[in-house]
Amino acid sequence: MFICIHLWQIAAMDDLHTVADFRKAARRKLDPVAWDYFASGSDNQRAKRRNRAAWDEIELQPRVLIDVATVDTSTTVLGLALPWPALVAPLAYQMLAHPQGELATARACADAGIPMIVSTMANVDLETVAQATAAPKWFQLYCHRDRGITQDLVQRAQAAGYQALIITVDAPVLGRRIADERNRFELPPGLTRANLARYEKPGANAAGGSHLSDLFRTRQDASLTWRDIDWLRGLTSLPILLKGVLRADDAARAVDAGCAGVIVSNHGGRQLDAAIATARALPGVAKAVQGRAAVLVDGGIEWGADMLRALALGANAVLIGRPVLWGLAVGGQAGVSRVLGMYAEDFSRAMQLAGCTNLADTRGLA
Ligand SMILES: Cc1cc2nc3c(=O)[nH]c(=O)nc-3n(C[C@H](O)[C@H](O)[C@H](O)COP(=O)(O)O)c2cc1C
C-alpha cells in the first residue's frame, strides 16, 4: 500500500518541472491555514515580492567558447563539502506539510548531500532529526529570554552532533503575518514545538491573534545585542553564523565578533516588510566580509540562474526555503528530493550556459 502511494506520488510529480509547478501543486494539497502560514510574507508582502523581483533584474554576462562539457559544481563551506552550493533553510513546523515533516526533509537532504538547517521551531526534536541520518546538519537558534533555555538548546545541538549554530537575528519580535492573525493560526492537536516541549508550562500561551506571535512576545528575547553573541560564542565550540544580516557594517561587525559567517536574509519577507531585497544587499555584505567568513544568501531563489547570480554577487552558497516545503507537501521525502534534484540540474546547466567550469569562474559574471 505504502509502495503504491509512493509510486503514485512520483508519477504525479513527473508533470512538475519548476518551483512554481510545485508551489501550485502544494497549494492544492495543503490545508488553507497551513498554506497561508508557509506562503505569507509580513504586512503587505512587499519584501517577499522584492526578493524575487531583484534576482530577476540581475543580468549576467556569460563567457563563450569555454569547454563546459563537464563542470564542477562542488564547493566547501566552513569545511563542509557540498555537491552544489546550497543548504536547506531553517523552516519551522514541517509536519504541517507532511506527516514525516523534518524527518522526510532530513532524509532527502542526506540523499542529495545538501545539509539541512534544523529550526528551533521544528515539530521533531533536534536529537531525533540528528539521528535520522548521518549527514551533516546545522542548528538554527532563536534566543529565548530565559537564558537557561537558550544555553540548553545550544548544548543539546552540540551534543547531538550539529556542525554549526545559526543565530537568527532578524526576529527580535515576530513580523506581522496578517493571514495568520485572521486564521488565528496555531499548531493543530498532536503537533508540538518538539524542541521546546520540555520547557513549556501547561496553558502558558494566551488565546487570540496568532499563536506564534503570542509565543514570540512571551518567549523571544527582544533585547538581544552583540554582547550576547559573545556570550553565545562562549557556550559552544561550534562555528556561529548570523542569519538576517542585510548591512555591510553589521556583516563586518559579525566577522570582528568572531562569527564564521553571515546569512543575507530578510526571513523570506516575513519580518520587516520594508527590508531591502537580499540580492541588493548581498554585494555590500560580501565586500565588507572580504572572504574572512562565509557569506550565504536566501529569499526567492527559485532557479539555477538565481544561484549563479548569488555566486556572481559574492555569495559562497544559497539557502533554499519555501520550495522545500512545496516539495515536502506534494510528495514527502520524494518531493523534497525532486525539488533538490531540480535545483542541482538547473544550476549545472546555468553554469554551462554562462561558460563556468567551476564556482571560481562565477566571479566576474555580474
Ligand atoms: C514557513 C516558514 C518557516 C520559517 N521558519 C524559520 C525558522 O524557524 N527560523 C529561521 O531562522 N527562519 C525561518 N524561516 C525563514 C527561512 O529560513 C528563509 O530565510 C526564507 O524562507 C528564505 O526565503 P524563501 O522562502 O523565499 O526561499 C521560515 C520561513 C518560512 C517560509
Image (tube, rainbow, N blue to C red):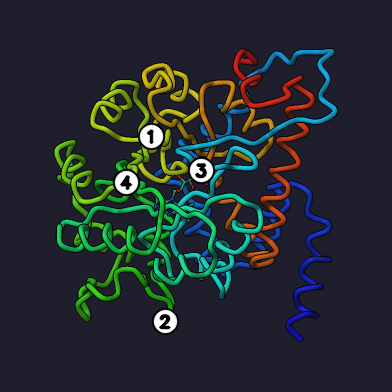
Dot 3 corresponds to which residue?
80
The kind of secondary structure element at disc 1 is strand
Q: Quadrant of the N terminus?
A: bottom right
Residue 184 placement, left or right of 63: left
Between label 2 and label 4, give the one nearer the viewer: 4
Please tell me which residue is depicted at 56% across the width and 73% down the height of the picture.
100
Dot 2 corresponds to which residue?
189
Q: Sequence order check: which comes first, mark 1 or mark 2?
A: 2
361 over 238 or under it: above or below: above
Q: Sequence order check: which comes first, mark 2 or mark 4?
A: 4
- Of residue 20 and residue 100, the one placed in the foreground of this image is 100
Mark 1 vs mark 4, CA separation in Å: 11 Å
In the image, the residue with mark 1 has its CB under 8 Å from the nearest atom of ligand 1: no
Between label 3 and label 2, give the one nearer the viewer: 3
**Mark 1 and 4 residues: CB-CB less than 8 Å, in contact?**
no
Dot 4 corresponds to which residue?
167
Residue 82 placement, left or right of 277: right
Q: Sequence order check: which comes first, mark 1 or mark 3?
A: 3
Residue 194 placement, left or right of 350: left
Please tell me which residue is depicted at 73% across the width and 24% down the height of the picture.
357
Task: Give amino acid for label 4.
Answer: Ile
Please tell me which residue is depicted at 65% across the width and 15% down the height of the picture.
365
Q: Sequence order check: which comes first, mark 3 or mark 4?
A: 3
178 over 209 or under it: above or below: above
Task: Give amino acid for label 2.
Answer: Pro
Dot 1 corresponds to which residue?
261
